[in-house]
Every structure is written in C-alpha cells, then in structure tokens.
Amino acid sequence: MTTAMRNQATTGSLKERLKTALSQARQVCGLGSESSDDCKMAWDTVAELGIATSVQEQEQPFFDAYCGENPGAMECKVYDT
C-alpha cells in the first residue's frame, strides 16, 4: 500500500468517525440537556476529530493527494526494477 493510499484510507476513516460522532452528539444532546456532561463530552469528541482530520489533510503532500485521487495517472505509476 502506498503512502498516498494509507493517508487517504486514514483520512477517510477519520471523516467517517467525525460523521458518526457528529450524529451521536446531536442525538445525545437532543435527548437531554445541552449542558449535561454527556452532551459536552460528545461535542468535545466532535471537535477533536475535526481538528485531527484538518491536521491530517494539511500534512498530506500535494503529489500524494493527487496520486490518491488519480491512481491511473502516468506520473503516479510505480515500477519495480
């Protein structure tokens, strides 16, 4: 697995975890008080995952991102010699 593929898979999983955490936070806070500890912890989780996703996207080099989106591109092909 190439670095671009690993970064894309990790970013994808972080984005999925962020979506799930967002949904759970909305559900938890909708059931009870918005000032409850459970609600606060749910939104803290959303914030931390959002930051992690943002940082990881910024750390991904342009070429790796390009090859992740265009794996068939001529300049992204890897040859074993």
Image: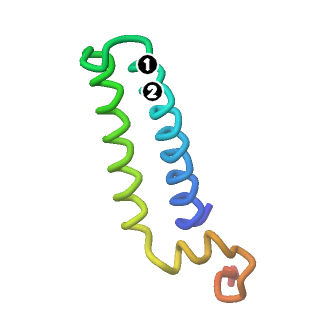
For the residues labelled 2 and 1, say whether their Cβ atoms are less than 8 Å apart: yes
Question: Is residue 17 toward the left or the right of residue 71 in the image?
Answer: left
Instruction: State the image quarter where residue 54 is shown.
Output: bottom left
Q: How is the image coloured?
A: rainbow
Q: Is residue 3 above or below residue 81?
A: above
At 43% from the left and 18% from the top, the residue drawn is 30
Question: Is residue 53 toward the left or the right of residue 6 in the image?
Answer: left
Residue 31 image point, x, y percent: 43, 12
At 44% from the left and 75% from the top, the residue drawn is 61
**Residue farthest toward the right in the current orientation of the protein:** 72
Regarding mark 1 in the picture, which secondary structure is present there?
helix
Residue 43 image point, x, y percent: 33, 31
At 41% from the left and 52% from the top, the residue drawn is 53
Q: Report the residue marked by disc 1.
A: 30
Q: Amino acid at mark 1?
A: Gly
Mark 1 Cα-neighbour bin, 10 Å: few <14, some 14–19, many ≥20: few
In the foreground, 5 or 24: 24
Question: Is residue 5 toward the left or the right of residue 59 in the image?
Answer: right
Q: Amino acid at mark 2?
A: Arg
Q: Identify the image quadrant of the C terminus.
A: bottom right
Q: Identify the image quadrant of the N terminus.
A: bottom right
In the foreground, 33 or 12: 33
Q: Is residue 73 above or below residue 12?
A: below
Q: Is residue 36 above or below residue 12?
A: above
Which mark, by number, is residue 26?
Answer: 2
